[in-house]
């Protein structure tokens, strides 16, 4: 095991620091005692004191983990109170240890000395708590830094994949062929409209920063440019329905994260239907979470036995896996992505990400 693996395993790293720290505390105590005239048995006293501190601070770790997200002033009060309780208990244990080992001629310390002993222990416990929070915050900052670097890398990869699709010869051929057909039948107004939307869509795709976040309303607006282009191919066979709440429309989302999902629906659902295909886009906010749901009525028939077959498009769709990787890079564990069977036919993509606004 190398040092990098040690730092990545948070639980192992804690125990290494815990053990090393209290051994160091015992050594410092013993070295400080060498300047005074003490009995040889004082080594045992120091070792038992360090061992008591080692054991008593372990529950603090689990307490601090549970209260990590409380308000700062509540956190400070709980930490101070818990540290005081641990310090007082540690002082009692030290006193009892001294009494048992120095039985002859030893008397329990008086209340004033006990108070001073408790205060000294409190400084040590507060120092332990401070180191715990400093290391924890440092680990969080490192996680955020790594997450940001990963997000940048994944976003650039995602942009390349999107550009590879958006400039796909088949896509451009189908779109330009549809425009050409409109011109031949003297539908110049419709042809001009389609050319304008194609231009706007490609301009947004090429000019937009890959890691930039935009409002969901803007995301839907650009998505409609893409769908309007596809409607030329499928005509009445493609119907799009949207239901976006006001709060959801204000939410910040990764740029063009829905386009690969819509592409997937068109490829595996709409293109395989002889009847009308329907794509529904819904978005709402609940419990500070943005919920986005995209569903289609593809040809797969829903049954409990065949549900796994109906989601096979997930493994074959580069866009879906790409979207999941982008969400993971941007939000870590604070996202949800699921592809399931729709009822009676088709598929549903459910996405949940933190609700963030400008």
Image (cartoon, grey):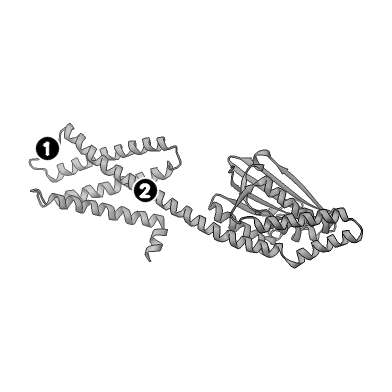
**How far apart are labels 1 and 2 at the CA level?**
40 Å
Q: Which is more N-terminal, label 2 or label 1?
A: 1
Viewer-proximal residue, 165 or 331? 165
| Residue 257 shown left or right of residue 153 in the figure | right
Instruction: Give coordinates of residue 151: x percent, y percent.
Output: 55, 57
Figure check: 118 above or below 181: above
Q: Which residue is mark 2?
A: 134
Instruction: Give coordinates of residue 305: x percent, y percent.
Output: 70, 57
| Residue 352 shown left or right of residue 13 in the figure | right
Question: The C terminus appears in which quarter of the rendering?
Answer: top right
* Number of numbered discs on residues: 2
Please report the residue visible at 40 percent of the width from the left and 55 percent of the height from the top: 10
Tag 1–tag 2 contact (CB < 8 Å): no
Residue 70 figure quarter: top left
Please report the residue visible at 12 percent of the width from the left and 44 percent of the height from the top: 102
Q: Which residue is mark 1?
A: 107
């Amino acid at each position: 095991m190398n040092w990098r693996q040690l730092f990545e395993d948070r639980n192992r790293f804690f125990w290494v620091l815990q053990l090393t720290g209290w051994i160091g505390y015992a050594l410092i105590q013993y070295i400080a005692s060498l300047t005074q005239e003490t009995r040889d048995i004082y080594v045992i006293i120091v070792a038992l004191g360090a061992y008591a501190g080692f054991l008593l601070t372990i529950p603090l770790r689990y307490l601090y983990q549970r209260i990590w997200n409380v308000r700062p002033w509540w956190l400070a009060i709980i930490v101070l109170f818990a540290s005081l309780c641990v310090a007082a208990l540690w002082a009692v244990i030290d006193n009892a240890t001294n009494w048992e080992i120095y039985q002859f001629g030893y008397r329990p310390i008086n209340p004033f000395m006990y108070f001073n002993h408790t205060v000294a222990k409190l400084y040590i416990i507060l120092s332990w708590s401070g180191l715990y929070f400093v290391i924890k915050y440092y680990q969080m900052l490192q996680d955020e830094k790594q997450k940001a670097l990963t997000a940048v890398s994944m976003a650039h990869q995602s942009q390349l994949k999107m550009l590879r699709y958006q400039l796909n010869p088949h896509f451009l051929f189908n779109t330009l062929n549809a425009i050409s057909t409109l011109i031949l039948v003297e539908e110049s107004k419709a042809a001009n409209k389609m050319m304008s939307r194609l231009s706007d869509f490609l301009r947004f795709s090429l000019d937009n920063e890959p890691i930039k976040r935009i409002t969901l309303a803007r995301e839907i607006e650009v998505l409609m440019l893409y769908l309007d282009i596809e409607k030329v191919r499928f005509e009445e066979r493609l119907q799009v329905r949207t239901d976006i709440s006001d709060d959801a429309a204000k939410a910040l989302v990764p740029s063009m994260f829905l386009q690969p999902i819509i592409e997937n629906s068109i490829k595996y659902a709409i293109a395989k239907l002889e009847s009308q295909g329907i794509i529904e886009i819904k978005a709402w906010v609940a419990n500070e979470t943005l919920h986005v749901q995209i569903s289609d009525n593809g040809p797969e028939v829903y049954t409990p036995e065949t549900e796994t077959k109906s989601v096979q498009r997930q493994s074959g769709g580069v866009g879906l896996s790409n979207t999941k990787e982008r969400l993971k890079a941007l939000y870590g564990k604070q996202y949800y992505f699921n592809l399931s069977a729709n009822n009676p036919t088709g598929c549903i993509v459910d996405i949940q990400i933190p609700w963030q606004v400008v």
